[in-house]
Image (cartoon, rainbow, N blue to C red):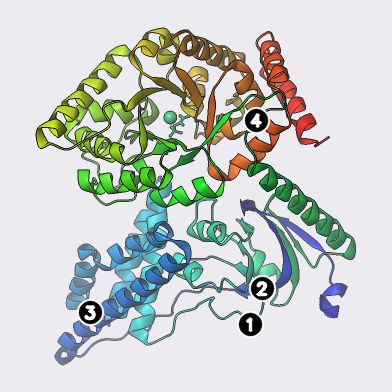
Amino acid sequence: MPSDSRAKSEVIVQGISASQGIAYGPIFVYLRSDVEVPTYTVDPTKRMEEIARFEQALVLTRQQISKIQDEVEKNLGADEARIFDAHLMVLEDQALIGETIREFEATSRNIETCFNQISSRYIKAFDQIDDEYLRERAGDIRDVAQRVLQNLLGQSANNLSKLADKRIIVANDVTPSDSASIDRSQALAIVTDTGSKTSHAVIVARSMRIPAVVGVRNLTTRVQDGDWAIVDGYDGTVIINPSEQTLFRYGQIRLQKKGFEDRLMEANRQPAVTLDGVAVTLMANIEKVDEVALVKEYFASGVGLFRTEYLYLNSARIPSEQEQFIAYKTVVAALAPAPVIIRTLDLGGDKPMAGNPTLFPKEDNPFMGFRAIRFCLEHPEIFKDQLRAILLASVHGTIRLMYPMISGSEELDRANAVLAECKEELCARGQPFDEKMAIGSMIEIPSAAATADILARQCDFFSIGTNDLIQYLLAIDRVNDRIAHLYEPSHPAVIRTLKHIVDEARRAKISVGVCGEMAGDPVFVPLLLGLGVDSLSMTPPLLPAVKYLIRAMTMADARALAAEALTLSSPKEIYARCEAFYRARMKLE
Ligand code: PEP
Ligand code: MG
């Protein structure tokens, strides 16, 4: 640490933890400022030239963004690179371009001024929309517009690609283009004044595996280049000019976290077997094809939930049967013979297909609305494309097919009838598929739980979607912050319902797993296993902690915990028992 910063006093500021890890180093302050646009009148004889200048700037911007996109794809993968599709789309927006040219023709003011004015109007309109996804589009337009203006004015872009040495980047804002240019070998951490957990900078920081903290208001005005800081990406704290004492404490924490993580990763290489010899199946939840790499990296026994709607959400249109077949085949073949549970489309609710208001009209109550299997049964052409793609991929490995949001036996019958039609169509085409492909139902609606005995006769397995099951059982909107404290997985209603579902699955001799977030929360893992759940499926990075815990507990103790939980009446009491069980096995007291 440089001697002058030792004299400065320590300041602790709090933001939102966005990417885990702890970093310590000197700060590089990055202030992104809007381009200053001069205004002047263009001579009538130069009108064509002015429009040509605009077109050239658009072409140049397109080339620059495509180059960044290629680099991001190379460094971070295809999914991260897709952020820039939205940018390229801004450059093709005929309304934005057309209005700029019309404004120029009407006023004869230079094209920068016209473009700045029209794009600012668009940005303002998107900024005011009460929808996080669309608000983020304002950021995309702002980013692209700044780039076009820089090109028109012959300025070079701000970028983070040339950090002189290892630095913590403290920025007022980090746009996707900025984050793509970050020098990966020199960036220790990212801290921003603005932003949310889902901002692009955060996605990039996570994939670079460096700590990030966002929403630290006005931090850029309170630090200088060369100040030293600790960034704690675990709890969102930033400590500027830390004292020797703090440095020592953080050094210890870093060692502890590292030691703990090493222990977990070591356990992760071993089988998931309890101390009394019961093997547990641990699977991975994935949303994108390239996450198959994580399934392997974290030694999952297969995929317990492939949320296929992400193939649609990231695409401007409904993917074709062939496109889907390739996606499913890639995943299944990469993991064969391990099973892959492919869940059919669960669009709607918190996952509407953006830009498609005809298929997904706005609803007052989307979580209870036109989503998942309800949507698929109303749109058999879309549903059948997906089912045929899954059937075709089934010969390349082990696919188990699962329907989301089943509310009762008739719905399951109707879905299976559509599947039967698809099988006939493939037979007629002479295309092979796995005739014995297992069919499962998600149990995530209370009516499905209550009729689990009936549903169990109609399918080969259950997978309990606790995220939705809890929200519907407790009438707590799962994405509403104001009532988040009432969303209690340890509520006796939840525990009893889980027990009922498991018992009915057992009686019908079908397997039952959990694929909601509860399955990846080590506090609840012993309870779920004690209730008799066969398999747990979770986001891959959660697997090491869950496996470590399973290897440190007995199934007999887990059963006793579940039996006790079933006698208790308070969610807090049940949670406390589960937490004590977990802390004792993880040696966290
Ligand atoms: C669930 O509801 O628990 C689940 C796994 O599905 P999703 O989170 O995709 O609704
Ligand atoms: Mg669900």
Q: Earlier in the sequence, mark 2 or mark 3?
A: 3
Residue at mark 3: C-beta within 8 A of ligand 1: no
Q: CA distance from mark 1 to mark 2?
A: 8 Å
Q: Residues within 10 Å of mark 2 (few under 14, many from 20)?
A: many
Q: Image height check: is 86 above or below 538?
A: below
* Separation of marks 2 and 3 at Cα, in angstroms: 38 Å
Task: Inspect the image, locate mark 1, and give the three-letter code of the amino acid beneath it.
Answer: Ala
- The label on residue 55 is 3
Identify residue type, mark 3. Answer: Glu
C-beta proximity under 8 Å, tags 4 and 2: no
Counting residues from the start of the chain, the first of labels 1 and 4 encountered is 1
Q: Going by the picture, which residue comes out furthest to the left?
A: 428
Quadrant where the N terminus is found in the figure = bottom right
**Residue, disc 1:** 164
User: Looking at the image, in which quadrant does ligand 2 appear?
Assistant: top left
Q: Quadrant of residue 362?
A: top left
Residue 442 is situated, as x and y percent measured from the top left of the image, at: 41, 24
Q: CA distance from mark 3 to mark 4?
A: 63 Å
Q: Is residue 359 left or right of residue 210?
A: left
Number of numbered markers: 4
Question: Is residue 320 visible to the viewer in this orientation of the structure?
Answer: no
Relative placement, left or right, of 25 versus 182 is right
Q: Are marks 1 and 2 in contact (CB under 8 Å)?
A: yes
Instruction: Examine the rendered structure and indicate whether residue 12 appears above or below residue 531.
Output: below
